[in-house]
């Protein structure tokens, strides 16, 4: 839809580039910006610029950071012997929100995907191997997504770290809380049965 307002249309097109934002949502966001006062818009724009200029990657784990180390790597209360490997920084924040994990992390920045031309050299694997060797890591939890590429990456990491003697684990997969067996897919049920625990 053309409003005869090229700037408004450009703003809508920018919002449409965001994941999960279609035409209607982009239009709603653009009109929300128009309803904001000038100072709010300037602060919003400045925050976007600052985020892009000042946020980089942690030198140790690959998480997002505003300096050399992220807040998790600087936190001395975290368990140093356990390392949870995730595909992206966004996955780390999901795990942190659970409040169940107090160890450290390592962000791969992707997964192995031969069809997409992504090999071991494209991921943050060398740093992972070095951390296991130098930081006294006892367990590596490989929390890649349960997909073909995620599973391939987990298997690669397990083989890569085999000689180190470190314990390599994968989070259990199973039935979601509050679900009904009737509506669970076969793959999930299979994984739940394989990962069963004693009561």
Image (cartoon, rainbow, N blue to C red):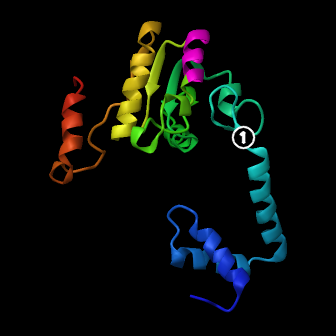
**Horizontal placement of 28 versus 147: left or right?**
right
Quadrant (top left, top right, bottom left, bottom right) of the C terminus: top left
- Residue behind mark 1: 56
**Is label 1 in a helix, a strand or a loop?**
strand
The segment highlighted magenta reads: 126-136
**Horizontal placement of 95 versus 10: left or right?**
left
Residue at 75% x, 58% y: name it.
Answer: 48
61 up-or-down from 94: above or below: above
Q: Is residue 140 visible?
A: yes
In percent of width and height, residue 103 lies at 55, 24
Confirm whether the magenta stretch covers residue 197.
no
74 up-or-down from 111: above or below: above
In percent of width and height, residue 30 lies at 65, 77
43 up-or-down from 106: above or below: below
In percent of width and height, residue 167 lies at 42, 14
Residue at 23% x, 35% y: name it.
Answer: 192
- Magenta stretch prevailing secondary structure: helix
**Horizontal placement of 85 versus 76: left or right?**
left
């Amino acid at each position: 839809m053309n409003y005869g307002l090229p700037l408004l249309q450009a703003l809508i097109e920018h919002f449409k580039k965001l994941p999960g934002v279609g035409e209607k949502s982009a239009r709603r966001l653009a009109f929300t910006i128009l309803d904001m006062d000038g100072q709010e818009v300037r602060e919003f724009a400045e925050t976007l610029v600052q985020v892009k200029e000042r946020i980089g990657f942690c030198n140790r784990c690959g998480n997002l950071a505003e300096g050399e180390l992220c807040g998790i790597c600087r936190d001395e209360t975290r368990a140093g012997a356990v390392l949870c490997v995730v595909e992206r920084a966004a996955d780390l924040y999901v795990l942190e929100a659970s409040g169940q994990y107090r160890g450290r992390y390592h962000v791969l920045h992707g997964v192995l995907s031969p069809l997409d031309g992504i090999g071991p050299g494209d991921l943050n694997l060398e740093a992972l191997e070095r951390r296991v060797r130098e930081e006294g890591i006892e367990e590596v939890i490989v929390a890649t997504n349960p997909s073909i590429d995620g599973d391939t990456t987990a298997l690669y990491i397990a083989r890569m770290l085999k000689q180190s003697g470190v314990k390599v684990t994968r989070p259990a997969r199973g039935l979601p809380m509050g679900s009904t067996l009737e509506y669970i897919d076969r793959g999930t049920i299979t994984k739940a049965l394989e990962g069963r625990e004693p009561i």
